[in-house]
Amino acid sequence: MVLGLLLLAPAVFGQDFGNTMTESRLFNVEMGFLAGYDFGAEETVTGSSTALNLAILENAEIGFVRVSFSSDDGVAVADTYNLLRFNYFFTQQLSLSLASGAESGSAAGSLGGNFLLVRSIPEDGFSSTMKINVQYLFNEAAGIGDGTLGISLLGTIGL
């Protein structure tokens, strides 16, 4: 992982940021909330998502993501996914998201898509977006079939 981060720096700083398709030219912080359905527990869930994304190509970014689901009372955290995510942008509004990591000590993954509702990337200054994210989260303990389908409303701000 350390080697991957060391190789990431030349990729980030060696690219042309003028015609980027990603959500920002260098990096962004992403925050939002989600609602979904847990197929294993057969119940609806709510939670939050935070991420730090780094642009590695004009149409790709890598991010460190934390998705937390609230317990039934809405106060405590029931499940937390810590993932390393890769976003590939097909257009300036549409991207595919693949992630792997851990949830409660077992291997976990995610497959999803993003649709950018609002996108603002000025020539110089902060960029911002608002997007809808649909993702399927799963872990090794429950299996792929008993994952969680979530829909998120996310906002980003970055450079």
Image: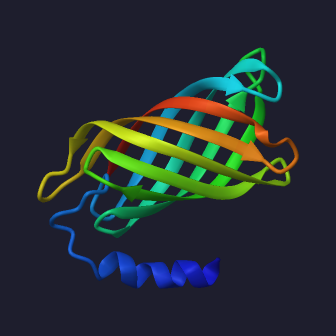
Q: Is residue 45 left or right of residue 78?
A: left
- Where in the figure is residue 114, as x and y percent of width and height? 41, 42
Which quarter of the picture shows residue 1? bottom right
Q: Of residues 65 and 159, which is closer to you in this image? A: 65
Identify whether 33 is placed above or below 159: above
Instruction: List x then y, in percent, for residue 120.
Output: 20, 44
Looking at the picture, tell me which residue is in the foreground, 128 or 89.
89
Quadrant of image for the C terminus: bottom left
Q: Is residue 65 above or below residue 129?
A: below
Give residue 64's quadrant in the image. bottom right
Outermost residue toward the left in this view: 123
Q: Is residue 77 above or below residue 157?
A: above
Please provide percent x and percent y for residue 82: 68, 52
Question: Is 2 left, or right, of 86 in this rendering?
Answer: right
* 67 vs 37, nearest the viewer: 37
Q: Residue at x 28, y 44 (%)?
A: 93
Residue at image coords 28%, 67% = 58
- What number of labels is visible? 0
Estimate the x, y position of residue 46 in percent, counting from the top left: 64, 23
Residue in the image at 32% along x and 65% along y: 26
Closer to us: 132 or 78: 132
Please tell me which residue is depicted at 78% across the width and 47% down the height of the picture. 139
30 lies left or right of 41? left
